[in-house]
Amino acid sequence: MATPIPPTFLPSPTPEPPPPTITAEPPPVVVAPAPVSQPPPAPGPAVQPTPAPPAPPVARGPVTINLVGKNLVYTQTSFSVASGARVTVTLDNQDLAVAHDVGVNLAGVPHSETCPGPCKGSITFTAPSPGRYEFFCSLHADMKGTFTVTP
C-alpha cells in the first residue's frame, strides 16, 4: 500500500497571473529654467534724443520759384515761403509739343497760360496765412506739389 503524501507536499496548481493593468502615465512636468539675474547696468552717459532735421529754408522777401516741367512731372515738388511774401512761380515747360501750365489752389489766383513746350509761363501771388497749399498743372493730374507758408 502506498503511503499517502501529505497535502502540503502536493503541487498546487499555478494560478494565472492577473491581467495587466493599463495606467495612463502622468504628463511630463516641464520646469522653466530660473531666470538668470543680471547685474544692474553700469551708469553711463544719458541717451540724447536725435534732433529733428532742419526745416527747409523759408524765403522772406519777394520770391521766385523756378519750376521745370519735363517728362510730365515738375522737377521740384515742394517749397516754403513766408506768409505775406510776394511769390512768382515760373514754369519752364521742356516737354516738346506737350502743353502745361501752373496754378495754385488759392481763390482769385488764375493759372498761367497754357503752352506747348518748349515755352515759359508764370503766376504771381501773395503768400496767404500759414499752412500747406498745392500747386499743379491743370492739364495733368500727376503734375503737382505742395508749398508751405510759414508765419
Image (spheres, rainbow, N blue to C red):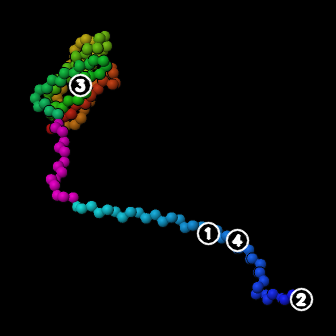
First in residue order: circle 2 vs circle 3: 2
Q: Pick the residue in front: 6 or 83.
A: 6
- Give the main secondary structure, helix, strand or loop, of the magenta stretch: loop
Could you give the CA–CA distance between mark 2 and mark 1, rounded to whole angstroms?
56 Å
Q: Which residues are magenta?
A: 41-55
Taking 124 as reference, is 69 left or right? right
Is residue 38 placed above or below 141 in the rendered structure? below
Amino acid identity at mark 1:
Thr
Which part of the image, by quadrant, shows the C terminus? Answer: top left
Could you give the CA–CA distance between mark 4 and mark 3, rounded to whole angstroms?
91 Å
Task: Provide residue 71's location: percent of width, then percent of height.
Answer: 30, 18
Amino acid identity at mark 4:
Pro
First in residue order: circle 1 vs circle 3: 1
First in residue order: circle 2 vs circle 1: 2
Residue for badge 2:
1
Frontmost of labels 2 and 3 is 2
Residue for badge 3:
76
Is residue 49 placed above or below 96 in the rendered structure? below
Q: Secondary structure at mark 1?
A: loop
Query: Residue 60 lies in magenta, yes or no?
Result: no
The residue at the point 17 percent across, 37 percent down is 55
Could you give the CA–CA distance between mark 1 and mark 3, rounded to whole angstroms?
80 Å
Which numbered circle lies on residue 23? 1
Q: Pick the residue in front: 91 or 105.
A: 91
Could you give the CA–CA distance between mark 2 and mark 3, rounded to whole angstroms?
134 Å
Task: Provide residue 68's location: percent of width, then percent of height.
Answer: 23, 19
First in residue order: circle 4 vs circle 3: 4
Frontmost of labels 1 and 3 is 1
Task: Provide residue 61's location: percent of width, then percent of height.
Answer: 10, 29
Residue for badge 4:
19
Frontmost of labels 2 and 1 is 2
Could you give the CA–CA distance between mark 4 and mark 1, rounded to whole angstroms?
13 Å
